[in-house]
């Protein structure tokens, strides 16, 4: 599954290169005194179709990443389980710290008060 996603992204990268090439060809053709309208039309159609494919594939990739990142069930993903486990560990550590603080407070409160100083011990 991950390899398929990477291959799809490589294809998107190639499409982006095609978009840039078409845009460059269009700009070069428009910079001429007499430009070839049919060449411009072909380049424009190729440019638009490449942009549409890039947009479609990137939207699909974003939807996939949004689904995985929000913890929704997803086949083959362990992100949600790992996130839940990490959050539970964080809560347990926080509880441990708070219980330690509470224990120290209780110990201080339960300590017997020091005996009063005798007149001979006072300075």
Image (tube, rainbow, N blue to C red):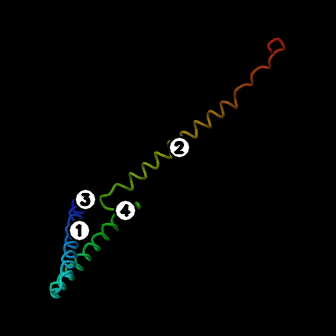
**Residue at the image position 24 percent from the left and 64 percent from the top:** 9
- The residue carrying mark 4 is 73
- The residue carrying mark 1 is 12
Sequence-wise first label, 4 or 3: 3
Q: Label 2 neighbourhood size at 10 Å, few (<14), some (14-19), many (20+)?
A: few
- The residue carrying mark 3 is 2
With 25 as the anchor, is 109 left or right in this view?
Answer: right
Q: Position of residue 96 (x, y in %)?
A: 53, 39
Within the image, what quadrant is residue 58 found in? bottom left
Dot 1: element? helix
Q: Position of residue 30 (x, y in %)?
A: 21, 82
Distance Cα–Cα, label 4 vs label 2: 28 Å
Marks 3 and 4: in contact by CB < 8 Å? no
Within the image, what quadrant is residue 103 found in? top right
The circle drawn on residue 87 is: none
Q: Position of residue 90 (x, y in %)?
A: 48, 46
The answer to whether residue 122 is above or below residue 11 is: above
User: If the image is split into quadrants, where does the C terminus sit?
Assistant: top right
Distance Cα–Cα, label 4 vs label 1: 26 Å
Sequence-wise first label, 4 or 2: 4
Distance Cα–Cα, label 3 vs label 1: 15 Å
Q: Label 3 neighbourhood size at 10 Å, few (<14), some (14-19), many (20+)?
A: few
Q: Nearer the viewer, mark 2 or mark 1?
A: 1
Q: Label 4 neighbourhood size at 10 Å, few (<14), some (14-19), many (20+)?
A: few
With 113 as the anchor, is 7 left or right in this view?
Answer: left
The circle drawn on residue 94 is: 2
With 63 as the anchor, is 10 left or right in this view?
Answer: left
The answer to whether residue 25 is above or below residue 10 is: below
The answer to whether residue 6 is above or below residue 38 is: above
């Amino acid at each position: 599954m991950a390899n398929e996603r990477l291959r799809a992204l490589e294809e998107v990268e190639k499409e982006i290169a095609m978009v840039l090439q078409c845009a460059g060809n269009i700009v070069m053709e428009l910079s001429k005194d007499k430009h070839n309208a049919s060449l411009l039309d072909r380049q424009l159609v190729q440019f638009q179709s490449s942009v549409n494919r890039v947009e479609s594939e990137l939207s699909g990739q974003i939807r996939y990443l949004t689904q995985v990142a929000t913890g929704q069930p997803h086949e083959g993903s362990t992100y949600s389980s790992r996130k839940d486990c990490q959050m539970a560990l964080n809560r347990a550590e926080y509880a441990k710290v708070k219980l330690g603080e509470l224990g120290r407070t209780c110990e201080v409160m339960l300590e017997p008060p020091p005996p009063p100083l005798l007149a001979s011990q006072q300075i």
